[in-house]
Amino acid sequence: CGMRCVATGRIVSAQPGVEATWEGQAVYHYLGVRIRIREGVKWRLAEMSGALTIVSASLWVEFPESLAGRLLGWHGKKHLGMVERGREHMRRELNHLKDVVERD
């Protein structure tokens, strides 16, 4: 989306075969401004009938309450497509997890 980002975090909860939650901090650089945001993702596995398992992910982001944070959030959603890019990123991660699970 035109913004460099470095995210660091850790798995804060995990139930093997059920779900895992990662939370961290991302530092975005855009137009010379550096903004830290909190973000996280929860991956879930849901067994369906037969051998079918559904893998899903929920992503959340918290922008700072500062003026710069609010502006970045608004600009990112409105002009940089951050919501759709976040969804695309989650689809790539889910496809990777699917590949890993199906190999085992």
Image: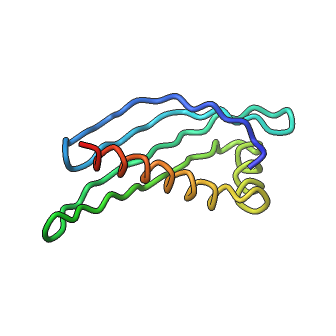
**Count of numbered circles on the image:** 0
> Above or below — where is 85 with respect to 3?
below
Residue drawn at 79 percent across, 60 percent down: 79
Q: Quadrant of residue 88?
A: bottom right
Q: Is residue 33 left or right of residue 7?
A: right
Quarter of the C terminus within the rendering: top left
State the residue lying farthest toward the bottom: 49
Residue drawn at 73 percent across, 36 percent down: 4
Q: Quadrant of residue 38?
A: top right
State the residue lying farthest toward the left: 50
> Above or below — where is 89 with respect to 39?
below
Q: Quadrant of residue 13?
A: top left
* Residue 68 placement (x, y as % from top left): 77, 42
Colour mode of the rendering: rainbow
Q: Nearer the viewer, residue 87 or 66?
A: 87
* Residue 59 placement (x, y as % from top left): 48, 52
> Above or below — where is 16 with respect to 59?
above
Residue drawn at 30 percent across, 54 percent down: 44
Q: Is residue 57 left or right of residue 32?
A: left
Q: Nearer the viewer, residue 102 or 81?
A: 102
* Residue 100 placement (x, y as % from top left): 34, 43
Residue drawn at 77 percent across, 50 percent down: 71
* Residue 80 placement (x, y as % from top left): 76, 56
State the residue lying farthest toward the front: 103
Q: Is residue 23 left or right of residue 69?
A: left
